[in-house]
Amino acid sequence: MKNLLIIVIIGFLALANNAQAQKKIKESDVIGTWKLNIDIDEAIQEVKNDLDEEDNLIGKLVLSSVSGLIDNIMEEIDIYLDFQKGGKLEILVNAFGEKEIEYSEWYITKKGELFIEDTEHIQTDNDRFVMTSNGIMVPAENYDEDAKVFLVRVAD
């Protein structure tokens, strides 16, 4: 189950975007607990819209058939990231009534972006987050478009 969750999360992070202005992140902005939110319906709709006309029918049928399944699965999964002083990160996954905790590390880059170390030590562009003017964090790769994946603070 852990590998499936990691694949799903990384896949949806790849679809992430945001329409807010970016601000440099400071350690005090990050410390605390954040909830990972994934807008599955929007992400799937964007993929449907991106299909070209020749792939349209088959691609949209496949996406329509799996979108409900993915949505139901994601309703059963809550992911919390507890950013601690000293660059320590605790990731709590509540899935299907079971809890799992992963540990990782984080730091702030010279550009003022939050970088989350991958627990598998594989670095991707989706490991970098920026903070928007409204205080949510989104993947840095496409921060200037609508967010499909974002972090919202739930506790200090």
Image (cartoon, rainbow, N blue to C red):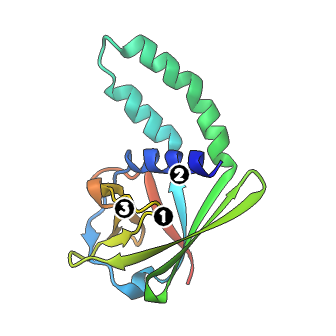
Residue 119 has which mark? 1
Where residue 25 appears, x then y in whole percent? 32, 78
Q: Nearer the viewer, mark 2 or mark 1?
A: 1
Q: CA distance from mark 3 to mark 2?
A: 13 Å
Q: CA distance from mark 2 to mark 1?
A: 10 Å
Residue 6 has which mark? 2
Crowd class of label 2 (few under 14; some 14 to 19; many from 20; radius 10 Å): few
* Three-letter amino acid code of the residue under disc 1: Thr
Q: Tags 2 and 1 in contact by the CB under 8 Å rule?
A: yes
Q: Quadrant of the C terminus?
A: bottom right
Where residue 94 appears, x then y in whole percent? 69, 59
Q: Tags 3 and 2 in contact by the CB under 8 Å rule?
A: no
Q: Secondary structure at mark 3?
A: helix
* Three-letter amino acid code of the residue under disc 3: Asp
Residue 3 has which mark? none
Which residue has dot 3 on it?
A: 127
Where residue 96 appears, x then y in whole percent? 75, 50
Q: Is residue 90 above or below residue 15?
A: below
